[in-house]
């Protein structure tokens, strides 16, 4: 069942890459066309991607719920709030500010769950719009597909390392550096820092050991990390949110610490969590 869903996600990701790529970095991409359910302004590139997701899922399933950063919570077919067992968590473009500025680091994040709770997610998929794909099925491991060579993409099993060092730290900083003092405690134990601008991609970089840990205390919306959380966990890492089994909607937020077990424990100790 989850293989079918992951194949659907992969096909959807390809179509989004093609359509988003056409307007990426243009004035059209950043055109404001409304307000998203998550509270941010909806840009044209977000809506283009979301329309593709809804169309692809609707063509393959009858009774389901989509929870998306732009459209909000929507039930389809005979599904309702009390009798639905197919939920799709969608962030059409994670990193839309990068996309509209012409920075090629933004992704589509898609997850499938049997309930609205984050611990019930069964399949997760993240696609760097101009690059690689990451995906996981619960109990089936996490994988990366490198698409740099279009004629011969390569597939790799992801296994998070058990290092005790934080050489490369991914960190997201609040507007105007409002949380800089707090996160500076962690930055002092890291050698290098990377602000990715896409939570989904940043977490996938942890799963693939490109980053040793990832920290976001703004805090971020959990809808942004539903797919990547499963990918990290299936790779053997930890995605700590400070709260147990959160219920997904468009506005729930939680502080995020991700990495291997040793590094997450180290960061929590420094932050006295």
Image: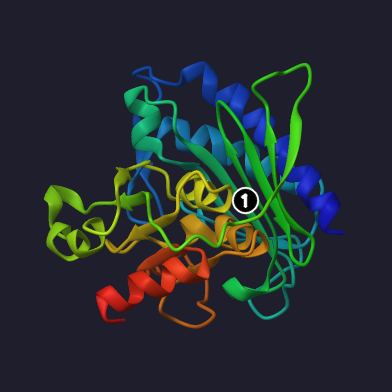
Quadrant where the C terminus is found in the figure = bottom left
SS at mark 1? strand
Q: In this view, does 248 lie to the left or right of 1?
A: left
Horizontally, residue 63 falls left or right of residue 112, namely right
Which residue in the protein does label 1 denote? 110
For the N terminus, which image quadrant? bottom right
Left or right of residue 12: residue 215: left
For this orientation, the residue located farthest to the front is 164
Task: Pick the residue in front: 191 or 47.
Answer: 191
Q: Which residue is drawn at 43% across and 69% down?
A: 264
Place residue 39 in its image quadrant: bottom left
Q: How is the image coloured?
A: rainbow
Could you tell me if residue 208 is visible in this image? yes
Q: Which of 261 and 102 is in front in this view?
A: 261
In this rendering, is residue 105 above or below 252?
above
Query: Going 71% across and 44% down the picture, which residue do you hit?
Result: 9
Query: Residue at 67% of width from left, 81% of height from top?
Result: 82
Dot 1, how many residues are within 10 Å of its Cα: few (below 14), some (14-19), or many (20+)? many
Q: Picture coordinates of residue 271 (x, y %)?
A: 26, 75
Q: Position of residue 104 (x, y in %)?
A: 44, 26
Which residue lies at the image location 62% right of the left edge and 62% below the top edge? 230
């Amino acid at each position: 069942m989850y293989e079918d869903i992951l194949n659907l996600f992969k096909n959807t990701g390809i179509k989004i890459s093609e359509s988003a790529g056409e307007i990426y970095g243009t004035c059209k991409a950043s055109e404001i066309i409304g307000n998203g359910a998550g509270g941010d302004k909806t840009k044209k590139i977000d809506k283009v991607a979301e329309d593709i997701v809804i169309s692809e899922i609707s063509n393959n399933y009858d009774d389901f719920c989509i929870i998306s950063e732009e459209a909000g919570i929507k039930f389809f077919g005979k599904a309702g709030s009390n009798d639905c067992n197919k939920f799709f968590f969608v962030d059409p473009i994670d990193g839309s500010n990068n996309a509209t500025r012409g920075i090629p680091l933004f992704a589509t994040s898609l997850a499938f769950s049997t309930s609205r709770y984050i611990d019930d997610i069964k399949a997760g998929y993240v696609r760097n719009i101009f690059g690689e794909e990451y995906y996981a099925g619960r109990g089936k491991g996490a994988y990366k597909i490198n698409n740099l060579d279009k004629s011969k993409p390569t597939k790799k099993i992801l296994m998070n390392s058990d290092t005790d060092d934080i050489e490369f730290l991914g960190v997201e900083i609040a507007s105007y550096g409002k949380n800089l003092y707090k996160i500076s405690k962690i930055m002092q134990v890291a050698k290098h820092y990377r602000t990715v601008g896409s939570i989904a991609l940043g977490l996938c970089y942890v799963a693939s050991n490109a980053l040793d840990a990832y920290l976001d205390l703004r805090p971020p919306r959990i809808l942004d990390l539903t797919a990547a959380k499963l990918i990290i966990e299936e790779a053997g890492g930890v995605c700590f949110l400070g709260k147990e089994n959160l219920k997904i909607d468009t506005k729930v937020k939680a502080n995020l610490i991700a990495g291997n077990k040793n590094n997450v424990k180290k960061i929590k100790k420094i932050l006295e969590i």
